[in-house]
Image: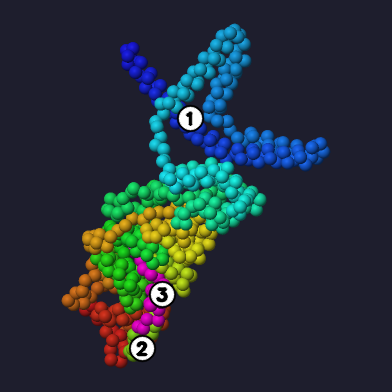
Amino acid sequence: MSHPSAWQTHRQYAATAAHWTADRWSKESDRRRTLRATRKPLVRDARAALAQAQATDPQKVTSLVHRAERELATAKRRVPDPMWLFASKAALVTAATGYVGLPLVPGRVWMWAAVAVSVAVAGAVLWAVLHRPAASPIEPTAEERDLLKRLQPEHWREHAEQRGLAGTLTGRPRLTESGIVVAVRLDGQWTATKLRGCEDHIRALLGARTGLRFQIKAGKQGGWAELTLRTRSAADGDDLLWAPERRSLGIDTVTGEHVTVPLGERLLIAGRSGAGKSVASRPLLFDASEGDTNALVIIDLKRVEGRLWDHRARVASTPEEVIAVVDELEAEMHDRLNVLPKGQDTWGPTLDRPRITVVVDEGAEVVTAADKVPFPEEDGDGKTKVRTRSALPGLESIARMGRAACIDLWWMTQKPTIGDGVPKQIAPQISTSICLAVRTPAEARVVLGEDAQAKGWNADELPAPGVALIRDGKRGPDPVKVRYMDKAVVIALPDQPIWSRTTTPTATGTAPTLTLVKPTAAPVVAAVDGTDARILDAIETAAAPVRQKDLAESTGLSKGTVSKAVKRLTDTGHITRRPDGGLTADKAA
């Protein structure tokens, strides 16, 4: 290697080492600065306690003074040296260790060696600091500058008692991408929960505006809380308009990361009127209806959101349609579970039998309107009678068992605390909750859990519209700005096949294929499977016409199941009802 190239290589190695040293220096310096800010107040308190003990027991008759001295010494040991002092001590210790370890070397040599090592270490550190990449500081706004001043320990200590916050003390606040964060030391009977109840006192002490959102949660160690003032958002400046290349649900306002909710979860989506619940759900509905192995079913009695998706989803908008589609979904679920391979926990979506996402828009309205719906049915004697039916039992069954059959229920509501806003059989099955702004803490607890507020999930304090909390067991209580998907964008989406059980089976004879549901000129006689096949087989093997009530005994099925199956087979032309009420199979069909 030539002399110039060798020199260039050494310079590159030196620059790399310098950058690495600067990075380590910066991280360690920040760590030590944070620890000093939080632990120096403990030293001041220990000194005050020692002074009080000496005044109480000047002759040191009791162990009060000795205990206070030990506590002061412990508090001092826990305060680390500044980085520059630590580096200087390390250099001197290194030189002294070498001097002691090699006594045969003349003392004058070691003296100059120690000086040289100290100068070299100090020069390397200084060079690394001067040449490290400049960090882009966060420039505080005028509001943030005022709040940072009032959050300083000196200002807090002076005004805490008159605001009812005696026994609390702040550390050094820091400005982040998502606002101001400060640790608060809690003495005596103070807890993070009690401090949260004094938010109005904190707001008055800081002179903060009423609309500024606070977040108070337990600190990283006992006796501390963490106060966050959401003066800014990490999502500021991001394009929140939905597009195929931007398919996340939204952006975390604290970390700035893109937040997604995968298919296969049982969701609860809640928010008061105007909070943006429908808009927030549209990116999710797109994912649930996109692809060859995904199908979407929407139950929407308001006929607003469902109408936007009727070219990509099966939509039920009347109580009768709701009953019918729930019957189909329940039958499909049981069929899948009956043929689920041994040892397999969940159904794998296929082209013939895709993943089905069932969305109930405004669940409270569905529970009320799709209850006691009159349905005419024929009894065993051929007479027609009317009985009432409800969609709720079928939806509860789908919530409990649908996951194994790859049929997922999403429940949406504006009124989670009124009536059956979230039915008691469905609520425990929810795996992910998406909560936009709600009116009361009670509504937030219903959606996010009873421990929501204690852990910082304050959905009643969210701004509206378009900001949500997502609790899935993995995320923290960081607000998410959801993407905006316009109605025109939904309408312009390409058509997708509409799921229905009344379709032509595949060559296997068991799994129905997805086809668009369109009216036909004449009824198509389709093959049957499942319960209908058992009823048809019982009629075909009988030597004489069979009465409907006898089918229930011979097949072991309930009367209601037999009645529905007979009606379907009659409508499709597979069987015929004689004038005397007997049922016969149409061999041609």
As measured in the structure, the alpha-carbon distance from the residue carrying label 2 to the one carrying label 1 is 84 Å
Q: Is residue 320 left or right of residue 69?
A: left
Q: Quadrant of the rendered structure where residue 13 is?
A: top left
Residue tagged 3? 367
Indicate the amino acid at tag 2: Lys
Residue tagged 2? 385
Q: Is residue 171 left or right of residue 568?
A: right
Q: Residue at the spot x=38%, y=77% of the render?
A: 370
Q: Residue at the spot x=68%, y=40% of the render?
A: 48
Image vertical order of residue 446 relative to residue 584, above or below: above
Q: N-terminal of the two: label 1 or label 3?
A: 1
Q: How many C-alpha atoms fall within 10 Å of the one at disc 2: few (<14), some, or many (≥20)?
A: few
Give the number of the mark in front: 1 or 3: 1
Residue 63 in picture, x, y percent from top left = 78, 39
Residue 433 in picture, x, y percent from top left = 44, 60
| Residue 406 at least partly seen | no
Q: Is residue 366 magenta?
A: yes
| Residue 78 at least partly seen | yes
Of residues 516 and 453, the one drawn nearer to the viewer in this rendering: 453
Of residues 170 and 577, the one drawn nearer to the viewer in this rendering: 170
Indicate the amino acid at tag 3: Val
**SS label for mark 2:** strand
Q: N-terminal of the two: label 2 or label 1?
A: 1
Q: How many C-alpha atoms fall within 10 Å of the one at disc 1: few (<14), some, or many (≥20)?
A: some
Q: Is residue 21 left or right of residue 538?
A: right
**SS label for mark 3:** helix
Residue 516 in picture, x, y percent from top left = 23, 67
Give the number of the mark in front: 3 or 2: 3
Residue tagged 1? 25
- Magenta range is 356-375
